[in-house]
Amino acid sequence: MATVHFLREGREVDVRIGTTLRAAARAADVCVYSRARKLLNCYGHGRCGSCRLVVTDGWDRLTAPTAKEHAAPRPLRGGAHQPAGIVPPLRERLACQARVMGDVALWTHPDQGAPSVAPESDPPCPKKRRRKGPVALTGATGLLGAVVARELQARGHTVRALIRGGREGAEHIDEEIVGDLRNPVSLERLVHKASAVIHCASAMGTNDAALLDAVNVEGTRDLVRLAHGAGVPRFILVSSIAARRPADGPYSASKWAQEDAVRRGGVPWVVLQPPVMVGNNSQVERAVENIGRRSPRVPVVGGDAPLYPVHVEDVATACVEAMERNGALGTTYQLGGPDAVTFRELASALLGEGGAADVVTIPVPLARAIAAVLGTVVPDKAPLTTEAVRAIVAGTPVDLGPARADLGFAPRTLAAALS
């Protein structure tokens, strides 16, 4: 059992573990809805955003925020709405989505005034003594993981990698564990007596929210739980800059929840947030070049927001530095290249000399319409998604100062990355 304290109403109630805050409120005779929303709400489906509350104590004793919470409309005065979702740093949750895992205290109806809650910050991680043993690596056959494995071996580390069955083993691996993130048995073998975990694997390129949740969120949660049980002294997560915008879509929400699982997991951690990566036949390079081979014109989404593409080898170096440096523990680092370019400019650079004349810009409204249609026709594997359009329009502004200072991060220019 757990106790839920409703501070505004001065009431508390004991509920079973796993009970939603909405159900707890009803048990305490507390209404989480205001005014007309007492009748006009989504009845616990997470669509109206009107059961918003502020958690003053026990944020970590609730289940992680869901994708519905990140996408829920935000009620404003006058009946207007904006799709802003909850604000996790201010400890906002939706009562119908948050489930109780321990004692919590909260404040209902924050729109009517609530106590000031200090923004949630990343708690410092305890520093543990280094441990001899292999480095457990996921995603070793992917774009980034293969380069991380090579860098680890070059520095004298033993690499134990999780390899999906039926795939060829990657180079620079000393020990292969066959399995995937949805197989806890293989994860337990992966982390046994490991000196660190570098988690590069991720589901991407799909709109399948169930798959993204199973791999990125639940798989990571199992991995960090088993790493904690095995006494692994540090956990390096390669997330994405998309995690800063969880309301954009299912992939972004899954990366935010993935980070949340690592921070809650009990293992000293470092989170890295790279933007789009180039080099080594990256995904964006293959996409642009494949279109360029089939058509004299390469369509790209317009927009002037800056992107900061980074070379995959620079990200790999940051992964290993984060693992080796004690001072980096408990920190989230934004990564990126030094050059700010639009998506059109990036596509032109990928096409090489004279490529600019072959790039055709799609207006943002048209791109949104195309993405919406594709999302209906081929929802799981649409070549252009609404989430991708939002990311391009928003850009990927990054603060490289902390990574430069703590990790010695010195990314190469875009020209050098593509040479």
Image (spheres, helix red, strand yellow):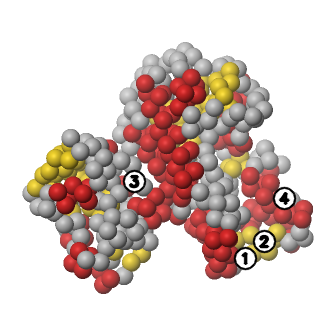
Q: Quadrant of the N terminus?
A: top left
Local SS, label 4: helix
The residue tagged 1 is 362
Q: Position of residue 96 (x, y in %)?
A: 32, 60
The residue tagged 2 is 299
Sequence order check: which comes first, mark 3 or mark 1?
3
Please give the name of the residue rendered at 66% of the width and 75% of the height, measured from the top-left corner.
373
Pointer 4 local density, CA inside 10 Å: few below 14, some 14–19, many at least 20: some
Sequence order check: which comes first, mark 3 or mark 2?
3
The residue tagged 3 is 65
The residues bearing labels 2 and 1 have C-alpha atoms spaced at a distance of: 6 Å
The residue tagged 4 is 289
Pointer 1 local density, CA inside 10 Å: few below 14, some 14–19, many at least 20: some
The residues bearing labels 4 and 2 have C-alpha atoms spaced at a distance of: 12 Å
Q: Is residue 401 visible?
A: no
Q: Amino acid at mark 4?
A: Glu
Sequence order check: which comes first, mark 4 or mark 1?
4
Q: Nearer the viewer, mark 3 or mark 1?
A: 3
